Amino acid sequence: MGEARAKQLADRIQVLVAELLERRVKDPRLGFVTVTDARLTGDLREASVFYTVYGDEQSRASTAAALESAKGLIRSEVGKALGLRHAPSVAFFLDAVPENAGQIEELLAKAREADAEVAKSAAGAKPAGDADPYKRKDDDEDDED
């Protein structure tokens, strides 16, 4: 199977799992889940589904338990919808994108503060040598006269 086919099926699995979690899985432990990505191995046997959960650590843990218990239903429904000979096994992984995005935002804020300090200190600064240290053709002609 080609990589393009695996990517196409992975995109379809992402949509199917999101729809199943919204409509078919009625587990009360399931929190506010967003399916962020799905990846499928080249032999189409294993699907990795990445998700995020809105809430605290307890809601993440309960959602992980709910997804683990619904894994069989999700696998059978995905197999039926894709029409493959073998339904891929499904594994769920908590996506760390929100935490990483928060860290990146903090680093960008620190960089903006440092840039502002440099700009403030450079506002009244004067060059150490000539104001314009670069030679120009105009200057060379004046020296020859």
Image: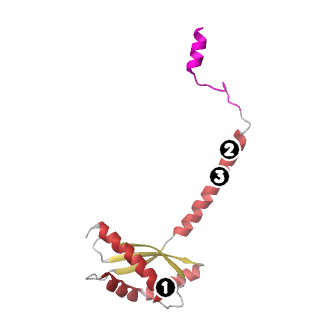
Q: Nearer the viewer, residue 32 or 61?
A: 32
Tell me which amino acid carries mark 1. Answer: Glu
Q: Position of residue 32 (x, y in %)?
A: 55, 81
Q: In terms of image quadrants, where is residue 88? A: bottom left
Residue situated furthest right in the rendering: 124
Residue that appears at 33% across and 77% down: 46
Q: Quadrant of the C terminus?
A: top right
Residue that appears at 27% across and 82% down: 86
Tell me which amino acid carries mark 3. Answer: Arg
| Residue assigned mark 1 | 22
Q: Is residue 110 rendered magenta in the image?
A: no
Q: Is residue 28 above or below residue 125?
A: below
Q: Nearer the viewer, residue 103 or 3?
A: 3
- Cβ atoms under marks 1 and 3 closer than 8 Å: no
Residue that appears at 66% across and 49% down: 114
| Residue assigned mark 3 | 112
| Range of residues picked out in magenta | 126-145
